[in-house]
C-alpha cells in the first residue's frame, strides 16, 4: 500500500491537472460562443447567394457552366478540415477515421489530399499517400478571404480537368455535445433547388450576361460552401474540446475523492499500527 | 418625400446594414457605376471593387467600400452581397495605401508570370477603400 506521503503527492498532481483542464474548458467555451455567433452571422450571405442562383436559373433557362458539369470520377481531390490542436476528445480521431475510410473506398481514383489544420495534417500524412497541401487553420477567427485561395485552387483543378470531383470532410456542428463528421461533395456544384415561387419566375435584368454572371455566382457559392464547412468545423472543435475538458475535470474530481479516501485509510492504518505497537510493548514490559 | 426601398448589405462575416429608408444606391457594376432608386426593375448584377453610396430618406449619405460581390433587386428590395464591406471609420488607411502601392508597382514591373488580373483587382480594392475613407488616391 502506498504511503500517505505518496498519496498526498498524487492528489496534488491531480489537482494541478484539474486546474489546467478547468481553464481549458473555460477558454473553449468562450471561443465556442464566438465561433457559434460567426456561424450564425455567415448564414444570411449563404442563404442569399443560393436564392440568387435559384432566381437566375429559374429566369434564364438552360444554363450550363463548367463548375456544374458532371463527369465520370476518374481522379478526385479531397479537402480535409482537421483539428488545429489536440485535447478535443474524439474530434480528431473521428476525422482521421472518416478520412481513412474515404481513402480506402476511393483508392482507385488516386485522391489528391489537402488538409487544413496542423494536428490533422500530422496524422493524415501518416495515412500514406498523396498529401499535396497542408495549411494551418487561422483559428477561430478565420476569415472568408483566408479560405478563398483554397477554394479557387480547387475550382481551377476542376475546370482544368485535373480532377473530376472535389470532396470535403468537415465536422458539422449540432450542439456543444454533438458534432458529426461527414463527407460532402464540393464540386461539381449541385445547383441549389428553386423552392420558392416556382413557375412564376420574375423577369430579371442581368449585368453582365447570365452565363458570365452564373460563373461568378457559382464560384462565390463554392467559396461560401467551403467557408461554412470551415466555420462549422472550427466551432465543432471548440465544442468537442469544451466537452472533453469538462469530463476531464469531473474525472479529476472523482479521482481526488478516491485518493482522499485511500489517504484517510492509510493514515488510519498507520495510527492503528502505532497504537498496537505501543500496546504490545507495554504488554511485554509487564 | 421620395419613395424609398429596403436595403440589405451582407458579407460572409456579418449583416452590415439593413434599412427600410434607402432612397438611392450607387454601386460599382461590372460595366461601370449604376444607380438604383425605389421600384427599380428586377436586376441581378455583379459588383466590382468600389464605393457604395447609400442615400437615406433623411438625406443622410453613407459611403462604404466593397471589394466585389453581387447585387439583387426584386420587389423593391435591394440586397448587396459583398465579399467585404467597410464603413469609412473601419478602414485601415495605412494598409490600403501600402496595398495600393504594392499593386501598382507590381503592375508597372511587368515581371514574367505576373497575374495582371489579380494585381489590377488588388489595386481597385485598395483605391476603393481609400476613396471611401476620403483619402486621396495617388496614381
Image: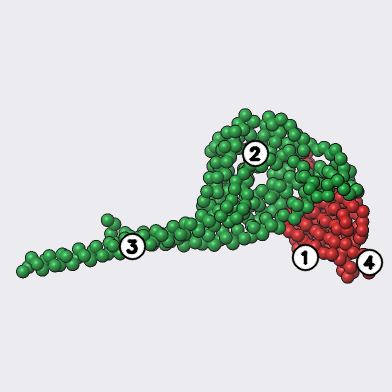
Chain colours: A green, B red
Q: Residues within 10 Å of mark 4 (few under 14, many from 20)?
A: few
Q: Which mark is residue A78?
A: 2
Q: Kindly identify which residue carries mark 3.
A: A261
User: What residue is rendered at 79% in x and 46% in y?
Assistant: A194
Residue B89 - label: 1
Does residue A53 appear to the left or right of A16 in the view shown? right
Residue toward you, B38 or B101: B38
- Along the polypeptide, which appears first: circle 4 or circle 1? 4
Q: Position of residue B87 (x, y in %)?
A: 79, 63
Q: Are marks 2 and 1 in contact (CB under 8 Å)?
A: no
Residue drawn at the location 85% of the way across and 57% of the way down: B78
- N-term mark: 2 or 3: 2
In percent of width and height, residue A68 lies at: 77, 38
Which label sits in the foreground, 2 or 3?
Answer: 3
Mark 3 crowdedness (10 Å alpha carbons): few <14, some 14-19, many ≥20: few
Question: How far apart are the alpha carbons under marks 4 and 2?
Answer: 53 Å
Give the residue pinned by disc 4: B2
Figure quadrant of residue A114? top right
Mark 3 falls on what kind of element?
helix
Depth-wise, is mark 4 or mark 1 nearer the camera?
Answer: 4
Q: Check contact, mark 4 vs mark 1: CB within 8 A.
A: no
- Give the Cα separation between the discs numbered 2 and 1: 41 Å
Work out how far the residue at label 2 is from the one at label 3, CA to CA, in angstroms: 52 Å
Q: Can residue A252 be seen in this snapshot?
A: yes
The image shows residue A227 at horizontal and vertical percentages of 69, 49
Q: Quadrant of the C terminus of chain A?
A: bottom left
Q: Nearer the viewer, mark 1 or mark 3?
A: 3
**Residue drawn at (60%, 46%) of the image:** A181
The chain letter for the residue carrying disc 2 is: A
Q: What secondary structure is found at the residue carrying circle 4?
A: loop
Q: Taking A82 as reference, is A188 above or below it?
A: above
Amino acid at each position: 500500500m502506498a504511503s500517505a506521503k505518496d498519496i498526498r503527492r498524487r492528489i496534488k498532481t491531480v489537482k494541478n491537472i484539474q486546474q489546467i483542464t478547468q481553464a481549458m474548458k473555460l477558454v473553449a467555451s468562450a471561443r465556442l460562443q464566438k465561433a457559434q455567433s460567426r456561424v450564425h452571422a455567415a448564414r444570411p450571405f449563404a442563404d442569399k447567394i443560393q436564392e440568387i442562383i435559384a432566381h437566375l436559373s429559374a429566369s434564364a433557362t438552360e444554363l450550363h457552366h463548367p463548375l456544374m458539369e458532371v463527369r465520370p470520377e476518374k481522379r478526385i481531390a479531397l479537402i480535409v478540415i482537421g483539428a488545429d490542436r489536440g485535447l478535443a476528445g474524439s474530434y480528431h480521431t473521428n476525422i482521421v477515421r472518416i478520412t481513412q475510410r474515404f481513402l480506402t473506398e476511393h483508392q482507385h481514383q488516386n485522391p489528391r489530399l489537402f488538409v487544413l489544420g496542423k494536428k490533422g495534417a500530422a496524422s493524415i500524412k501518416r495515412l500514406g499517400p498523396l498529401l499535396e497541401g497542408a495549411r494551418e487553420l487561422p483559428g477561430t477567427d478565420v476569415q472568408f478571404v483566408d479560405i478563398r485561395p483554397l477554394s479557387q485552387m480547387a475550382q481551377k483543378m476542376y475546370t482544368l480537368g485535373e480532377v473530376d470531383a472535389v470532396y470535403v470532410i468537415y465536422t458539422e456542428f449540432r450542439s456543444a455535445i454533438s458534432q458529426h463528421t461527414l463527407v460532402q461533395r464540393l464540386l461539381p456544384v449541385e445547383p441549389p433547388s428553386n423552392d420558392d415561387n416556382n413557375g412564376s419566375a420574375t423577369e430579371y435584368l442581368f449585368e453582365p450576361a447570365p452565363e458570365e454572371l452564373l460563373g461568378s455566382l457559382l464560384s462565390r457559392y463554392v467559396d461560401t460552401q467551403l467557408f461554412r464547412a470551415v466555420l462549422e468545423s472550427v466551432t465543432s472543435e471548440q465544442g468537442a474540446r469544451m466537452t472533453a475538458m469538462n469530463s476531464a475535470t469531473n474525472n479529476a474530481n472523482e479521482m481526488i475523492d478516491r485518493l482522499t479516501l485511500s489517504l484517510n485509510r492509510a493514515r488510519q492504518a498507520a495510527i492503528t499500527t502505532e497504537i498496537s505497537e505501543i500496546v504490545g510493548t507495554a504488554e511485554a514490559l509487564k | 418625400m421620395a419613395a424609398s426601398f429596403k436595403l440589405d448589405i451582407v458579407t460572409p462575416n456579418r449583416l452590415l446594414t439593413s434599412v427600410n429608408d434607402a432612397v438611392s444606391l450607387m454601386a460599382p457594376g461590372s460595366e461601370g457605376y449604376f444607380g438604383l432608386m425605389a421600384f427599380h426593375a428586377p436586376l441581378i448584377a455583379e459588383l466590382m471593387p468600389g464605393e457604395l453610396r447609400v442615400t437615406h430618406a433623411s438625406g443622410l449619405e453613407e459611403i462604404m467600400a466593397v471589394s466585389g460581390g453581387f447585387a439583387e433587386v426584386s420587389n423593391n428590395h435591394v440586397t448587396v452581397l459583398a465579399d467585404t464591406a467597410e464603413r469609412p471609420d473601419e478602414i485601415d488607411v495605412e494598409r490600403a495605401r501600402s496595398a495600393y502601392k504594392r499593386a501598382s508597382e507590381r503592375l508597372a514591373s511587368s515581371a514574367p508570370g505576373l497575374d495582371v488580373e489579380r494585381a489590377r483587382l488588388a489595386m481597385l480594392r485598395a483605391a476603393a477603400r481609400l476613396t471611401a475613407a476620403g483619402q486621396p488616391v495617388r496614381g
